[in-house]
Image (cartoon, helix red, strand yellow):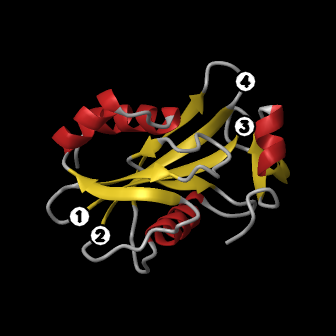
Amino acid sequence: MTNPAEELLDVVDAEDRVIGTTTRPVAYRDGLTHRCVFILVRDPRGRIFTHRRSAEKLFAPGAYDCFVGGVVASGETYPQAAVREAEEELGVSGIEPRPLFKFLYSDGDRMSWFCDVYEALWDGPVSPQVEEVDWHDWLTEDELDRRIAEWEFVPDGLEAYRRYREFPAS
């Protein structure tokens, strides 16, 4: 796993066109728009993989999330990043994320990133990265909705989940 402080990512403009490259800490510090992937993973019973992020995360440490994912590395495509991030965070191989939609997330202050959202089915054990995940479970949508009202979730994940719930099923 690459050290997040050394990880290079592409800086993009308002049309999601690459205009530069920088490290993750610099992108966060300077509020540079970059790219991320979000993968909602369900098991065959329809439950959603939900986890608490480690306290060492640069963004939203210790918060809960119902997506696995992360930043798109410099030169990487969204689909490549979706597979890499899902496999790394879940500790699996052979996952096949299906693209759903993309949106520009902004914290309302100065940080923003394009979020490419995917869905995947996983029928097997998971072994989440201890560097990334402090706790995990598979929750039904009703359980997840209750937890969202009780726990602190990552703000971009909440926005992605809201949009996911409104997204037309295919």
Q: Residue at x 40, y 80 (%)?
A: 94
Is there any visible trace of residue 18 in the rendered image?
no
In the rendered image, residue 167, in percent from the top left (x then y), is placed at 30, 37
Distance of label 4 from label 3 (alpha carbons)? 9 Å
Distance of label 1 from label 2 (alpha carbons)? 5 Å
Residue that numbered label 2 is attached to:
122
Which of the two discs, 2 and 4, labels the residue nearer the N terminus? 4
In the rendered image, residue 106, in percent from the top left (x then y), is placed at 61, 27
Query: In front here: 131 or 68?
Result: 131
Whether the residues at callouts 3 and 1 have beta carbons within 8 Å, the answer is: no
Distance of label 4 from label 1 (alpha carbons)? 36 Å
Look at label 3 and name its amino acid.
Thr
Q: Considering the numbered disc 3 on the image, is that residue within a helix, a strand or a loop?
A: loop
Residue that numbered label 1 is attached to:
43
Whether the residues at callouts 1 and 2 have beta carbons within 8 Å, the answer is: yes
Is there any visible trace of residue 122 in the rendered image?
yes
167 lies left or right of 20 = left
Whether the residues at callouts 2 and 4 have beta carbons within 8 Å, the answer is: no
46 lies left or right of 6 = left
Q: Considering the numbered disc 1 on the image, is that residue within a helix, a strand or a loop?
A: loop
Which numbered dot is residue 151? none
Which numbered dot is residue 110? 4
Residue that numbered label 3 is attached to:
33
Distance of label 2 from label 4 (alpha carbons)? 35 Å
